[in-house]
Image (cartoon, grey):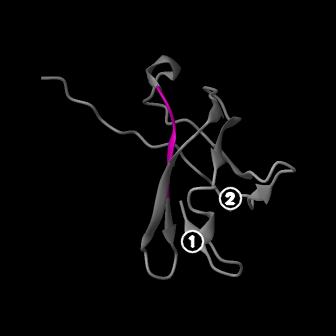
């Protein structure tokens, strides 16, 4: 049986705010640095888990619809927040 390990990327600092496009899509771009233990060819997708900062309650899990990977800095993933936008409120803080 194969064993898989999760080596999460490093998301440093504050994540930029999300924005609404002209077509009504809510987009969040998350910049990150790849974990050195992960080979670029081993990545099959990027997932984001969002939790409320004050209660640690999970708001949702999203798959990136677009991402770019780099062995140096400069990796990012784009997420469409439409499935959870009704659960996100102005003035509140969230953890990813």
On whether residue 14 falls in the magenta region, the answer is no
The residue identified by callout 1 is: 87
* Mark closest to the chain's N terminus, 2 or 1: 2
Horizontal side of residue 30 vs 36, given as left or right: right
Secondary structure under the numbered disc 1 in the rendered image: helix
Query: Is residue 74 rendered to the left or right of residue 33?
Result: right
Residue 24 horizontal side relative to residue 2, left or right: right
Compared with residue 28, is residue 89 higher up or lower down, i.e. above or below?
Answer: below
Question: Dividing the image into 4 quarters, which one contains the N terminus?
Answer: top left
Query: Residue pushed farthest front?
Result: 23
The front one of 45 and 33 is: 45
Q: Is residue 38 above or below residue 17?
A: above
From the image, tell me which residue sits under label 2. 15
User: Residue 84, position in %: x, y?
Assistant: 56, 62
Q: Residue at x 68, y 58 (%)?
A: 15
- The correct choice, above or below, for 51 with respect to 11 in the image is below
Q: Residue 4's x, y, as percent?
A: 27, 31
**Residue situated in front as seen by the camera: 2 or 11:** 2
Residue at x-position 79% and y-position 58%:
19
Q: Nearer the viewer, mark 2 or mark 1?
A: 1
Q: Residues within 10 Å of mark 1 (few under 14, many from 20)?
A: few
**Residue at image location 42% in from the left, 30% down from the top:** 37
């Amino acid at each position: 049986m194969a064993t898989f390990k999760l080596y999460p990327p490093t998301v440093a600092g504050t994540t930029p705010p999300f924005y609404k496009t002209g077509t009504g899509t809510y987009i969040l771009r998350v910049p990150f640095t790849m974990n050195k233990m992960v080979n670029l060819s081993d990545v099959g997708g990027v997932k984001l888990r969002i939790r409320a900062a004050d209660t640690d309650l999970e708001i949702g899990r999203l798959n990136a619809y677009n991402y770019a990977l780099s062995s140096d800095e400069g990796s990012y993933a784009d997420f469409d927040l439409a499935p959870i936008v009704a659960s996100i409120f102005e003035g509140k803080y969230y953890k990813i």
